[in-house]
Image (cartoon, rainbow, N blue to C red):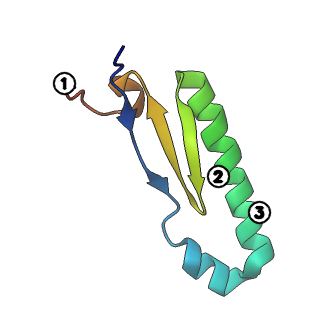
Amino acid sequence: MRVARTFAFVDLSGFTQLTDLHGDDEAVAVLSQFRAALRATASDIGVRVAKWLGDGAMPVSVDATGLGGATVPP
């Protein structure tokens, strides 16, 4: 059975510059807050985070509206 899925990519803009200016400890703190917020939001709207990519993530949903996108027929 095929199930249409919608993928997205979210990323912290300016993360490298933040790390350069404020150091690794501050960057890790920001990254921890980002991940906690994304996990909570994804859980609230029924979206799964399929992959963490450094300062980014790839959420996936079977409902395109959950990710703010449009469905594309398979």
Label 2–label 3 contact, CB within 8 A = no
Residue at x 59%, y 33% (from the top left corner): 41
Residue at x 61%, y 77% (from the top left corner): 18
- How many residues crowd mark 2 within 10 Å: few (<14), some (14–19), many (20+)? some
Whether residue 28 is situated above or below residue 3 in the rendered picture:
below
For residue 61, side relative to residue 49 (left or right): left
Q: In x, y percent, where is residue 22?
A: 71, 81
Could you say which is closer to the camera, residue 11 or residue 72?
Answer: 72
Name the residue beneath numbered marker 2. 34
Disc 1 and disc 2: Cα gap in Å? Answer: 32 Å
Could you say which is closer to the camera, residue 18 or residue 51?
Answer: 51
Q: In x, y percent, where is residue 71?
A: 24, 27
Q: Which mark is residue 73?
A: 1
Residue farthest front in this picture: 1
Q: Which mark is residue 29?
A: 3
Could you say which is closer to the camera, residue 49 or residue 68?
Answer: 49
Label 1: element kind:
loop
